[in-house]
């Protein structure tokens, strides 16, 4: 089996050295970067990113946003920050998990393994959907979406794994100048899921309770 590749981004030289040694013993291939400037240009072969938040130049939140513009691999935040606001911000930007320093090496490895496995299961049916020109196809079957439902799917699928609150989606798609209730987004999402279930058992839209929705198709 091909070794999984991890990209570790942290400005703590000693921590990077220790984690690299541990993870390589566990059978992983580990790339390292001490700041955003050292991140490899191409991350196509990276299976997961371990990302520190407190770094010079660009912090982990900015790096996460840049990575999410091109790639969908899991991002696991490493940080001494423990407040709820930072955790929510990381998830909203497309992060998948969060572990607080100091942490157990065994717990870190378990989280890495779990996130990679989950992502591979989700990707097993990757590229089986087409969303373009007002039409949505899954497994070569057209999903009969209303205009509003299509706009929601198009928005979420354009920013995979990023979490959109109902309010943000409503404002982005229709604007606050339009009279209505952002809660209508939840009803649209429910209808979209029911329609997708007719052609696929795979989950495409994930609910992040208290936060919003993200596209994981």
Image (cartoon, rainbow, N blue to C red):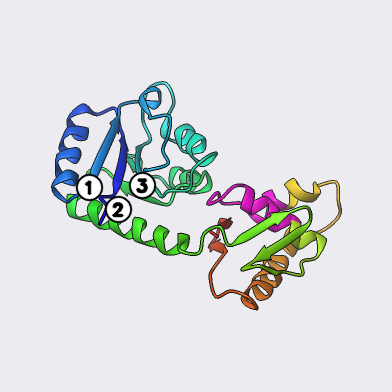
Residue 112: numbered disc: 2
Q: Looking at the figure, which quarter contains the N terminus?
A: bottom left
Q: Residue at x 69, y 74 (%)?
A: 195
Quick check: marks 2 and 1 in contact, CB under 8 Å?
Answer: yes
Q: Is residue 137 visible?
A: yes
N-terminal of the pair, mark 1 or mark 3, is: 1
Quick check: marks 2 and 3 in contact, CB under 8 Å?
Answer: yes
Q: Report the residue marked by disc 3.
A: 48
N-terminal of the pair, mark 2 or mark 3, is: 3
Q: Secondary structure at mark 2?
A: helix
Q: Residue at x 17, y 33 (%)?
A: 17
Occupied quadrant, residue 179:
bottom right
The image position of residue 181, as x and y in percent, is 78, 59
Give the extent of the magenta segment: 151-169
Q: Is residue 157 magenta?
A: yes
Q: Is residue 181 visible?
A: no
């Amino acid at each position: 089996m091909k070794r999984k590749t991890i990209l570790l981004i942290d400005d703590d030289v000693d921590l990077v050295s220790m984690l690299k040694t541990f993870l390589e013993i566990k059978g992983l291939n580990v790339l390292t970067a001490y700041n955003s400037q050292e991140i490899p240009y191409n991350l196509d072969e990276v299976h997961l990113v371990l990302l520190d938040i407190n770094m010079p130049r660009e912090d982990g939140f900015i790096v996460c946003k840049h990575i999410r513009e091109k790639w969908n691999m899991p991002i696991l935040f490493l940080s001494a920050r423990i407040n709820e606001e930072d955790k929510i911000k990381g998830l909203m930007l497309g992060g998948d998990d969060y572990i607080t320093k100091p942490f157990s090496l065994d717990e870190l490895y378990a989280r890495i393994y779990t996130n990679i496995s989950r992502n591979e299961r989700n990707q097993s049916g990757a590229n089986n959907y087409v969303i373009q020109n007002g039409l949505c196809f899954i497994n070569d079957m057209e999903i009969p979406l209303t205009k509003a439902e299509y706009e929601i799917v198009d928005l979420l699928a354009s920013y995979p794994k990023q979490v959109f609150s109902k309010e943000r989606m409503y404002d982005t798609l229709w604007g606050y100048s339009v009279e209505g209730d952002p809660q209508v987004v939840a009803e649209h999402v429910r209808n979209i899921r029911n329609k997708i279930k007719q052609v696929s058992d795979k989950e495409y839209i994930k609910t992040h309770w208290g936060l919003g929705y993200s596209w994981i198709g």
